[in-house]
Image (cartoon, rainbow, N blue to C red):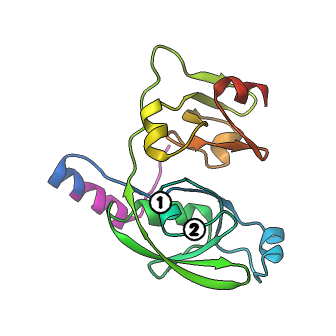
Amino acid sequence: MSFAIPIDIAMDVAQQLRTSGKVARSRSGVQAQELTRGLAASFGLQEPRGAQVANVVRGGPAGKAGQQPGDIALSLNGQPVQSLADLARLVAGVKPGTTVTAEIWRKGRNVPIKITTVELAAPAPAAGGDATLAAKAGLYLSEIPTMQRRSLGIEGGVLVHRAEGAALRAGIQPGDLILRFNDVSVRGVSQWNRC
């Protein structure tokens, strides 16, 4: 098995480890999804490029900047967002505390907004086996720790510890928070298991 990452990311990681002993990644406080051809057409875009904002964390960086669910991220600091993966990579690649300019598509026009990112907190490890396998989706989940929920300004959701199968192929990663499923708010692991 082998994998490759862009050299600029590898060099940045190496430099951060040398200078501070840890790698800091940014977050903007949005949950986004891939933009399909059908969704792009419904928003008046000629091609499915960008990432659609599904949820904005209340009180988070993007929320403070005025970003809204339904916005489509087209670029970040002049770098194009072609897909959801591009958006995640570009946000994570800036130093926490950096103000970035995002170009978004809202109601048929381009809107520039400025977002000041914050550091992405490492996911808390599962305590005493409270991670639960939601087998139908290939996810190991636990409740989001209270302090993390408060710092993010959210009331519910579940924390992903491991993804496999279809969930992994869909791009879900450890540390992701799932706040909605099939357009229903997820309050916790027990509710997730009933979905």
Which quarter of the figure has residue 195?
A: top right
Q: Is residue 185 above or below residue 8?
A: above
Nearest the viewer among 91 and 5 is 91
| Residue at 61% in and 21% down | 132
Query: Which residues lie in the magenta part?
Result: 1-15
Relative placement, left or right, of 118 versus 89 is left
| Residue at 39% in and 40% down | 122
Relative placement, left or right, of 139 versus 24 is right
Q: Is residue 15 above or below residue 124?
A: below
Q: Report the amino acid beneath label 1.
A: Ser
Q: Are marks 1 and 2 in contact (CB under 8 Å)?
A: yes
Give the CA separation, mark 1 to mark 2.
10 Å
| Residue at 45% in and 63% down | 91
| Residue at 78% in and 25% down | 194
Q: Position of residue 188 (x, y in %)?
A: 64, 29
Query: Label for residue 67?
Result: 2
Q: Which is more N-terminal, label 2 or label 1?
A: 1
Q: Secondary structure at mark 1?
A: loop
Relative placement, left or right, of 23 versus 105 is left
**Dot 1, how many residues are within 10 Å of its Cα: few (below 14), some (14-19), or many (20+)?**
many
Residue named by callout 1 = 28
Q: Position of residue 154 (x, y in %)?
A: 55, 43
Nearest the viewer among 2 and 108 is 108
Q: Report the amino acid beneath label 2.
A: Gln
